[in-house]
C-alpha cells in the first residue's frame, strides 16, 4: 500500500502550438486529456488542478490558478503547493492520454521505497529523457527548491526548479509518457487509442 499522496496537475498553459485551443479539454476517444489524467490519479488524497475550472467527470477536484494566469509550470507548482498537505506530491501534466493508475502508484511507491535521501521518482521516457511532469516528489523538497529559486516563480523553467533534486529514475515500461504538444501528437494519440 502506497503512503498517501496528493497530485498537482498544471493545466493553465496558453497551448500556443494548438493555436490557443483548450488543450486539456481536447479528446482522445470520448475522454478529454484532463479526465484521462484525473482517472489515473484517482488514488490521490487531494487532486489540485492549476488552471481555469473546466467540466470534468471527476468529483472532488480542487481548482486554483497560478499567478499570473498562464505564468508557466513553476508558477503552477507554487499555486498547487498551497493546497497540498501530503508528504508526497505527484506533478502530472494535463496532456498525458495514456497515463494510468498503475504508473502513478508505481512512482509514489518508488519514492517511498527509495528512502529519505531521494527527493523525486521521475519517469524516464523511451528516449531516455526525464519527465518532471510525470514524477513523484517529496513535498518538503519541492517546497525547499521553490524557496531557493527566490523571487517570482512566473516564467521560471521547470528544470531549474527540479534540476538539483536527488532523483530516482523510473523506466516508462508501459509507454505512458507520451504527451500531446502538437496537433500531430494528438492525432497520433487518437490513432493509438483506436488500435
Image (cartoon, rainbow, N blue to C red):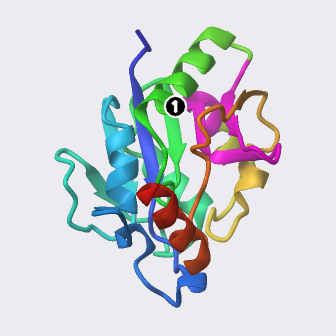
Q: Residue at x 35, y 71 (%)?
A: 25
Disc 1 crowd rating (10 Å Cα; few below 14, some 14-19, many 20+) is many
In this rendering, position of residue 105 left or right of residue 126: left
Q: Is residue 119 magenta?
A: yes
In the image, residue 56 lies at what x, y percent?
Answer: 22, 59
Residue 63 appears in the rendering? yes
In the image, residue 126 lies at what x, y percent?
Answer: 76, 44
Q: Residue at x 49, y 75 (%)?
A: 68
Q: Which residue is mark 1?
A: 103
Question: Magenta span covers which residues?
Answer: 118-143
Q: In the image as oriented, which residue stretches furthest toward the bottom? A: 19
Residue 182 appears in the rendering? no
Looking at the picture, tell me which residue is in the foreground, 83 or 132: 132
In the image, residue 144 lies at what x, y percent?
Answer: 66, 37
Q: Is residue 113 magenta?
A: no
Instruction: Tell me the element at label 1.
Output: helix
Q: Residue at x 73, y 62 (%)?
A: 157
- Toward which corner of the image does residue 12 lie, by quadrant? bottom left
Amino acid at each position: 500500500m502506497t503512503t498517501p499522496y496528493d497530485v498537482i496537475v498544471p493545466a493553465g498553459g496558453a497551448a500556443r502550438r494548438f493555436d490557443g485551443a483548450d488543450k486539456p479539454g481536447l479528446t482522445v476517444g470520448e475522454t478529454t486529456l484532463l479526465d484521462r489524467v484525473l482517472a489515473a490519479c484517482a488514488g490521490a488524497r487531494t487532486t489540485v488542478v492549476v488552471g481555469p475550472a473546466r467540466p470534468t467527470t471527476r468529483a472532488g477536484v480542487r481548482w486554483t490558478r497560478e499567478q499570473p494566469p498562464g505564468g508557466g509550470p513553476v508558477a503552477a507548482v507554487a499555486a498547487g503547493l498551497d493546497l497540498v498537505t501530503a508528504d508526497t506530491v505527484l506533478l502530472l501534466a494535463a496532456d498525458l492520454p495514456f497515463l494510468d493508475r498503475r504508473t502513478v502508484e508505481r512512482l509514489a511507491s518508488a519514492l517511498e521505497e527509495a528512502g529519505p535521501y531521494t527527493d523525486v521518482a521521475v519517469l524516464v521516457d523511451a528516449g531516455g529523457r526525464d519527465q518532471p511532469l510525470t514524477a513523484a516528489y517529496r513535498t518538503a523538497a519541492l517546497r525547499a527548491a521553490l524557496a531557493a529559486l527566490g523571487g517570482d516563480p512566473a516564467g521560471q523553467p521547470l528544470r531549474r526548479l527540479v534540476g538539483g533534486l536527488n532523483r530516482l529514475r523510473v523506466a516508462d515500461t508501459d509507454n505512458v509518457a507520451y504527451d500531446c504538444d502538437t496537433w500531430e501528437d494528438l492525432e497520433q494519440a487518437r490513432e493509438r487509442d483506436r488500435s
